[in-house]
């Protein structure tokens, strides 16, 4: 797969920030951590990774805009293009020594995501996609799963953590979904949940109240892998609402009905 210049910039940046995160992950007990809000932590590792990503991405494309979880927002000289970055998605896992976290980088053009990279550095799995060019994991083209029976399917979600207000909705969803399917998983890194749907590892995923940087890269990876993705309420915009529902094509309608009814 030969990507565009921008995709190569994104992959190179993800690898460089990934090396920094893997190093910090090995000595995670020594990291300085602070709390941004209820249950929302940030560490030296998040900050260091974001600094590397900013140097790499803005260094290569100085006119683009910038939106990142730990460093706020800048409108670039070119208002049509913007990097959307989560330097460490799954910080809570990272801080507990759980190897399930990722770097998420998206490129937006005129309000639409045109390229996305989700890098699981601990497992060296680089998920990426570019509009019209398919979705990939390392050297392999990926596709959503072909399962179409609910009873054989597994779904992922995020369980609301301290401070998040969507508990009643999530409990209602779970009560309807759990008896109908083969299982529900909760891993704690939204960008990887999306990448796993794209790779056919589970059939679908839904979650509410996410941030733009959790979702932007994963959205295009799911689409390019042949998946369907919308906001939980299909009239909403995914990135601005932060609510997402995605699945392979064959099960989408049945799954969406369970969550939406
Ligand atoms: P973060 O690690 O970048 O903050 C969905 O669960 C998203 O919520 C995750 O991708 C995660 O992104 C964020 N999040 C923030 N605090 C969390 C917590 N205590 N538990 C799980 N996810 C959390
Ligand atoms: Ca966070
Ligand atoms: Ca995140
Ligand atoms: Ca983060």
Image (cartoon, helix red, strand yellow):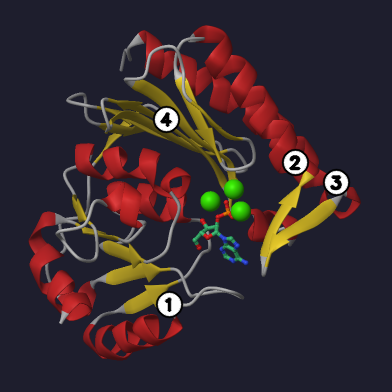
Q: Nearer the viewer, mark 2 or mark 3?
A: 2
The residue pinned by badge 2 equals 45
Is the CB atom of the residue marked by disc 4 within 8 angstroms of ligand 1's nearest atom? no
Q: Choose between 232 and 14: the one closer to the eye.
A: 232
Query: Label 2 to label 1, Cα distance in Å?
Result: 28 Å
The residue pinned by badge 1 equals 166
Q: Check disc 2: other Cα within 10 Å, few if <14, some if 14-19, many if 20+.
A: many
**Marks 4,2: beta carbons within 8 A:** no
Rendered view: 64 above or below 85: above
* Left or right: 75 as drawn, with respect to 237: right
Tell me which label, 4 or 2, sits earlier in the chain.
2
For residue 98, say whether it is visible: no
Q: What residue is at 45 percent from the left and 82 percent from the top?
A: 167
The residue pinned by badge 3 equals 27
Rendered view: 147 above or below 171: above
Query: Label 1 to label 3, Cα distance in Å?
Result: 34 Å
Element type at marker 3?
A: loop
Q: Check disc 1: other Cα within 10 Å, few if <14, some if 14-19, many if 20+.
A: some
Query: Label 4 to label 2, Cα distance in Å?
Result: 24 Å
Query: Label 4 to label 1, Cα distance in Å?
Result: 35 Å
Q: State the image coordinates of residue 229 (x, y, percent, origin top left).
A: 21, 53
Q: State the image coordinates of residue 249 (x, y, percent, origin top left).
A: 11, 56
Tell me which label, 1 or 3, sits earlier in the chain.
3
* Left or right: 53 as drawn, with respect to 209: right
Q: Check disc 4: other Cα within 10 Å, few if <14, some if 14-19, many if 20+.
A: some
């Amino acid at each position: 797969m030969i990507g565009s210049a921008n995709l190569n910039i994104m992959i190179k940046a993800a690898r460089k920030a990934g090396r920094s995160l893997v190093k910090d992950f090995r000595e995670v007990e020594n990291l300085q951590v602070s709390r941004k809000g209820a249950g929302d932590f940030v560490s030296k590792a998040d900050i260091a990774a974001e600094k590397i990503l900013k140097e790499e991405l803005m260094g290569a494309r100085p006119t683009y805009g910038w939106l990142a979880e730990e460093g706020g927002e800048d409108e670039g000289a070119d208002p049509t293009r913007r990097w959307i970055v989560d330097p460490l998605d799954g910080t809570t896992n990272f801080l507990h020594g759980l190897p399930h976290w990722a770097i998420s980088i998206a490129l937006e053009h005129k309000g639409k995501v045109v390229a996305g990279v989700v890098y699981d550095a601990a497992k060296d799995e680089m998920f990426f996609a570019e509009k019209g060019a398919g979705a990939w994991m390392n050297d392999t083209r990926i596709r959503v799963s072909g399962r179409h029976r609910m009873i054989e399917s597994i779904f992922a979600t995020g369980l609301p953590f301290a401070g998040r207000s969507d508990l009643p909705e999530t409990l209602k969803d779970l009560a309807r979904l759990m008896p109908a399917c083969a299982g529900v998983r909760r891993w704690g890194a939204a960008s990887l949940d999306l990448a796993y749907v794209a790779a056919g590892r589970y059939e679908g995923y839904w979650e509410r109240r996410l941030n733009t940087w959790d979702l932007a890269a994963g959205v295009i990876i799911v689409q390019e892998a042949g998946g369907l993705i919308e906001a939980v309420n299909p009239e909403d915009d995914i990135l601005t609402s932060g609510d997402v529902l995605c699945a392979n094509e064959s099960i989408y309608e049945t799954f969406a009905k369970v969550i939406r009814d």
